Image (tube, rainbow, N blue to C red):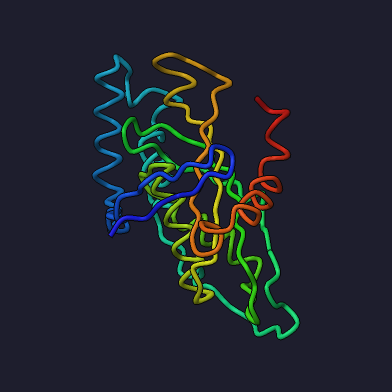
Amino acid sequence: MTHALYSPVSGESTALPPQTGPAAPGPVDTERIADLIGQLLAALGEDPAREGLAGTPARVAAWWRDFLAPDPSAMATCFTETHASDQLVVVGGLNVWSLCEHHMLPMQLDAHVGYLADGTVLGLSKFGRIAQHHAGRLQMQERFTRQLADEVAAAIGSQDVAVTVHGVHLCMSMRGVRMERARTSTVQAGGRFKTDPLLSQQFLTLTTAGQRGTA
């Protein structure tokens, strides 16, 4: 089954393929990573044993372990709120770091999540934890956007969820074309956000207002 993403700006719908993301990362072998980093330093013409580099392989290995460790507290917590009916809730500023799986360079992702509260609200701190959980791996911005939307939708039991992500990719800023000011934006919309142009426009207006001055 494919999904269509409605753009209130162009009025067009774009077919999206079914979600087929990789599984979460497995255990990190820090000893093996440290050994490989030592080999990399040697291949780059450095002396891994010299002052300043002696502890680098272990530090790099520890960083990979910490970055790729899944957060067990990412479980979403919902609260019953009878007065929250058909209310648009938008949580922005979910700024996380991830790693491009094509070049293994960092990308900074600024995510915004919107949903329609219908008697149930999602704990605010969980948005950040869910974003960090999916960012802490080799990733693609497009996949991250969909994973964030899918997990929030599963937590609130509704497809009325939309996510926008604005990304800065070092694989584009510091290599290749080296476009330092380039930005990538992705949108995932479901339920009424996909079928109601006014609701979709309200969400996009709220989540893109702060981006105009950063280009």
In the rendered view, tell whether residue 190 sits above or below residue 8: below
Q: Is residue 101 left or right of residue 199?
A: left
Rendered residue at 53%/32% (across/down): 168
Q: Is residue 27 visible?
A: no
Q: Quadrant of the C terminus?
A: top right
Instruction: Kindly indicate the quadrant of the structure image that contains residue 26.
Output: bottom left
Q: Is residue 153 left or right of residue 30?
A: right
Q: Residue 101: horizontal and vertical position, in percent?
A: 33, 38
Identify which residue, 164 or 129, lies in the foreground. Answer: 164
Q: Quadrant of the N terminus?
A: bottom left
Identify which residue, 83 or 8, lies in the foreground. Answer: 8
Rendered residue at 51%/17% (across/down): 179
In the rendered view, tell whether residue 32 sits above or below residue 105: below
Q: Is residue 130 left or right of residue 79?
A: left
In the rendered view, tell whether residue 128 sits above or below residue 164: below
In the rendered view, tell whether residue 14 sits above or below residue 123: above
Q: Residue 190: horizontal and vertical position, in percent?
A: 49, 60
Identify which residue, 139 or 116, lies in the foreground. Answer: 116
Q: Residue 166: horizontal and vertical position, in percent?
A: 56, 39
Q: Is residue 33 left or right of residue 202?
A: left
Q: Residue furthest front?
A: 11
Q: Is residue 177 visible?
A: yes
Rendered residue at 43%/54% (across/down): 146
Instruction: Kindly indicate the quadrant of the structure image that contains residue 9.
Output: top right
Instruction: Kindly indicate the quadrant of the structure image that contains residue 120.
Output: bottom right
Q: Residue 17: horizontal and vertical position, in percent?
A: 30, 50
